[in-house]
Image (cartoon, helix red, strand yellow):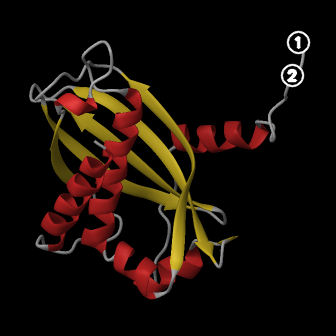
Amino acid sequence: MGMYIFTRMFYHIYKARKLPKIPFWQMNSSHHYCLPWDLDTFLELNNGRTLTLFDMGRTILGERTGFSATLRKHRFGLAVAGASVRYRKRITVFQKLEMRTRALGYDDKFIYMEQTMWNAKGECCNHLLVRAAVLKHKRMVDPIELLEKIDPDIKSPELPEWAKAWVEAEAQRIWPPMQNEGI
Protein backbone atom coordinates (compact mmCIF):
# COMPACT_ATOMS: atom_id res chain seq x y z
CA MET A 1 0.00 0.00 0.00
CA GLY A 2 2.96 2.36 0.59
CA MET A 3 3.86 2.55 -3.11
CA TYR A 4 0.32 3.67 -3.88
CA ILE A 5 1.09 7.14 -2.50
CA PHE A 6 4.04 7.56 -4.85
CA THR A 7 2.03 6.29 -7.80
CA ARG A 8 -0.75 8.74 -7.02
CA MET A 9 1.72 11.61 -6.55
CA PHE A 10 3.53 10.91 -9.83
CA TYR A 11 0.19 10.73 -11.62
CA HIS A 12 -0.79 14.18 -10.33
CA ILE A 13 2.64 15.64 -11.16
CA TYR A 14 2.37 14.25 -14.70
CA LYS A 15 -1.09 15.80 -15.12
CA ALA A 16 0.03 19.14 -13.62
CA ARG A 17 2.95 19.45 -16.03
CA LYS A 18 0.50 19.32 -18.95
CA LEU A 19 -1.58 22.21 -17.57
CA PRO A 20 -0.87 25.88 -18.32
CA LYS A 21 1.48 27.72 -15.96
CA ILE A 22 -0.13 30.07 -13.45
CA PRO A 23 1.22 33.00 -11.38
CA PHE A 24 2.61 32.18 -7.93
CA TRP A 25 -0.23 33.84 -6.02
CA GLN A 26 -3.06 32.31 -8.09
CA MET A 27 -5.29 29.63 -6.59
CA ASN A 28 -5.08 26.17 -8.15
CA SER A 29 -7.97 23.74 -8.27
CA SER A 30 -7.36 19.98 -8.49
CA HIS A 31 -9.64 16.96 -8.21
CA HIS A 32 -9.15 13.87 -6.07
CA TYR A 33 -11.11 10.85 -4.90
CA CYS A 34 -11.32 9.29 -1.47
CA LEU A 35 -10.24 5.71 -2.15
CA PRO A 36 -10.74 2.63 0.05
CA TRP A 37 -7.16 2.73 1.38
CA ASP A 38 -7.70 6.37 2.46
CA LEU A 39 -10.28 5.35 5.06
CA ASP A 40 -10.06 5.11 8.83
CA THR A 41 -11.99 2.72 11.10
CA PHE A 42 -15.08 4.94 10.81
CA LEU A 43 -15.06 4.50 7.00
CA GLU A 44 -14.23 8.13 6.29
CA LEU A 45 -11.13 9.92 5.06
CA ASN A 46 -8.36 9.35 7.60
CA ASN A 47 -7.01 12.57 9.11
CA GLY A 48 -3.43 11.58 8.24
CA ARG A 49 -4.42 10.82 4.65
CA THR A 50 -6.10 14.23 4.51
CA LEU A 51 -2.67 15.78 5.11
CA THR A 52 -1.18 13.54 2.40
CA LEU A 53 -3.82 14.69 -0.07
CA PHE A 54 -3.06 18.30 0.87
CA ASP A 55 0.64 17.52 0.14
CA MET A 56 -0.46 16.51 -3.36
CA GLY A 57 -2.36 19.76 -3.79
CA ARG A 58 0.71 21.80 -2.86
CA THR A 59 2.84 19.71 -5.22
CA ILE A 60 0.41 20.37 -8.09
CA LEU A 61 0.47 24.11 -7.34
CA GLY A 62 4.28 23.98 -7.23
CA GLU A 63 4.43 22.36 -10.66
CA ARG A 64 2.00 24.84 -12.21
CA THR A 65 3.71 27.95 -10.80
CA GLY A 66 7.29 26.89 -11.52
CA PHE A 67 7.99 26.76 -7.78
CA SER A 68 8.94 23.05 -7.85
CA ALA A 69 11.27 23.49 -10.84
CA THR A 70 12.98 26.41 -9.07
CA LEU A 71 13.41 24.31 -5.92
CA ARG A 72 15.09 21.55 -7.93
CA LYS A 73 17.21 23.85 -10.12
CA HIS A 74 18.68 25.81 -7.21
CA ARG A 75 18.79 22.89 -4.75
CA PHE A 76 16.44 24.34 -2.20
CA GLY A 77 14.36 22.18 0.09
CA LEU A 78 10.99 22.75 1.66
CA ALA A 79 9.74 21.43 5.00
CA VAL A 80 6.34 21.79 6.60
CA ALA A 81 6.96 23.73 9.81
CA GLY A 82 3.41 23.90 11.15
CA ALA A 83 -0.16 23.23 10.17
CA SER A 84 -3.66 23.78 11.48
CA VAL A 85 -6.57 21.81 10.05
CA ARG A 86 -10.28 22.35 10.53
CA TYR A 87 -12.48 19.33 9.73
CA ARG A 88 -16.16 20.07 9.10
CA LYS A 89 -17.77 17.50 6.75
CA ARG A 90 -17.28 13.76 6.43
CA ILE A 91 -15.52 12.52 3.33
CA THR A 92 -16.42 8.95 2.46
CA VAL A 93 -15.22 6.34 -0.03
CA PHE A 94 -15.31 7.24 -3.74
CA GLN A 95 -16.36 10.79 -2.96
CA LYS A 96 -14.94 13.24 -5.50
CA LEU A 97 -13.26 16.30 -4.02
CA GLU A 98 -12.17 19.62 -5.38
CA MET A 99 -9.03 20.86 -3.65
CA ARG A 100 -8.20 24.54 -3.78
CA THR A 101 -4.63 25.55 -2.98
CA ARG A 102 -3.01 28.96 -2.86
CA ALA A 103 0.01 30.71 -1.42
CA LEU A 104 -1.10 33.34 1.10
CA GLY A 105 2.18 35.14 1.65
CA TYR A 106 5.55 34.91 3.33
CA ASP A 107 7.62 36.49 6.07
CA ASP A 108 11.31 36.24 6.95
CA LYS A 109 10.93 32.60 8.07
CA PHE A 110 8.07 30.87 6.28
CA ILE A 111 5.83 30.65 3.24
CA TYR A 112 2.15 30.38 4.22
CA MET A 113 -0.40 28.44 2.19
CA GLU A 114 -4.13 27.84 2.45
CA GLN A 115 -5.94 24.73 1.22
CA THR A 116 -9.52 23.54 1.22
CA MET A 117 -11.41 20.42 0.12
CA TRP A 118 -14.94 20.77 -1.29
CA ASN A 119 -17.54 18.06 -1.92
CA ALA A 120 -19.87 17.76 -4.93
CA LYS A 121 -22.55 19.74 -3.06
CA GLY A 122 -20.23 22.73 -2.91
CA GLU A 123 -19.64 22.34 0.85
CA CYS A 124 -16.24 22.97 2.36
CA CYS A 125 -15.20 19.74 4.09
CA ASN A 126 -11.94 20.92 5.62
CA HIS A 127 -9.50 23.82 5.66
CA LEU A 128 -5.73 23.88 6.17
CA LEU A 129 -3.32 26.67 6.99
CA VAL A 130 0.26 25.48 6.59
CA ARG A 131 3.64 27.11 6.82
CA ALA A 132 6.75 25.82 5.11
CA ALA A 133 10.39 26.56 5.80
CA VAL A 134 12.77 27.02 2.89
CA LEU A 135 16.00 25.06 3.31
CA LYS A 136 19.41 25.45 1.69
CA HIS A 137 22.22 23.09 2.72
CA LYS A 138 19.95 21.74 5.49
CA ARG A 139 19.55 25.21 7.07
CA MET A 140 16.52 27.51 7.06
CA VAL A 141 16.84 30.55 4.83
CA ASP A 142 14.64 33.58 4.24
CA PRO A 143 11.99 32.50 1.70
CA ILE A 144 12.78 35.54 -0.44
CA GLU A 145 16.06 33.84 -1.48
CA LEU A 146 13.98 31.23 -3.28
CA LEU A 147 11.01 33.34 -4.34
CA GLU A 148 13.13 35.98 -6.09
CA LYS A 149 14.41 33.21 -8.37
CA ILE A 150 10.81 32.69 -9.53
CA ASP A 151 10.09 36.41 -9.87
CA PRO A 152 12.71 39.08 -8.97
CA ASP A 153 9.90 41.57 -8.25
CA ILE A 154 7.82 39.25 -6.07
CA LYS A 155 6.08 40.89 -3.13
CA SER A 156 4.10 39.17 -0.43
CA PRO A 157 0.45 40.05 -0.10
CA GLU A 158 -0.53 40.92 3.45
CA LEU A 159 -1.61 37.83 5.35
CA PRO A 160 -5.29 37.75 6.33
CA GLU A 161 -5.96 38.66 9.98
CA TRP A 162 -6.91 35.07 10.89
CA ALA A 163 -3.57 33.83 9.51
CA LYS A 164 -1.64 36.56 11.36
CA ALA A 165 -3.40 35.54 14.60
CA TRP A 166 -2.27 31.93 14.04
CA VAL A 167 1.33 33.07 13.41
CA GLU A 168 1.24 35.10 16.65
CA ALA A 169 -0.22 32.18 18.62
CA GLU A 170 2.46 29.83 17.27
CA ALA A 171 5.18 32.30 18.31
CA GLN A 172 3.97 32.00 21.93
CA ARG A 173 3.97 28.21 21.93
CA ILE A 174 6.90 26.79 23.88
CA TRP A 175 9.52 24.64 22.19
CA PRO A 176 10.50 22.08 23.06
CA PRO A 177 7.25 21.15 24.76
CA MET A 178 7.20 20.21 28.43
CA GLN A 179 8.00 16.61 29.12
CA ASN A 180 6.92 14.51 32.09
CA GLU A 181 5.49 17.54 33.92
CA GLY A 182 3.05 16.58 36.63
CA ILE A 183 3.55 12.83 36.25
Query: Do callouts 2 and 1 mark residues in contact (Cβ within 8 Å)?
Result: yes
The quarter of the displayed image where residue 49 is located: top left
The vertical placement of 96 against 103, above or below, is above
As rendered, which of 34 and 132 lies closer to the eye? 34
Secondary element under disc 2, as helix, strand or loop, is loop
Give the crowd class for mark 2: few <14, some 14-19, many >=20 residues within 10 Å.
few
Q: Does residue 173 appear in this view? A: yes
Query: Quick check: 105 above or below 32?
Result: below
Q: Name which residue lies at 22% across and 65% down.
A: 13
Question: Does any portion of residue 152 appear in the rendered image?
Answer: no
The C terminus: image quadrant: top right
Identify residue type, mark 1: Ile
Q: Of the numbered discs in the image, which one, if any, rests on residue 89?
A: none
Residue at x 18% of width, y 29% of height: 36
Please give the residue where the numbered disc 2 appears in the rendered image.
Answer: 180
In the image, taking residue 30 as reference, residue 117 lies left or right, namely: right
On the image, the x and y values in percent for residue 125 come to 27, 26
Residue depicted at 35% across the width and 56% down the height: 58
Question: Of the residues shown, which amino acid type is indicated by label 2?
Answer: Asn
Disc 2 to disc 1, how far (Cα)? Answer: 6 Å
How far from the left and from the top, in percent, is residue 181?
Answer: 89, 19
Image x and y of residue 151, in percent: 41, 83
Which quadrant is home to the N terminus?
Answer: top left
Q: Residues within 10 Å of mark 1 (few under 14, many from 20)?
A: few
Residue 42, placed above or below residue 152? above
Would you name the residue on which mark 1 appears? 183
Left or right, residue 133 beside residue 14: right
Place of residue 122 in the rendered image (x, y in percent of width and height, measured from the top left)? 14, 29
Image position of 16 (left or right of 175): left
Which residue is at the front of the view, 95 or 147? 95
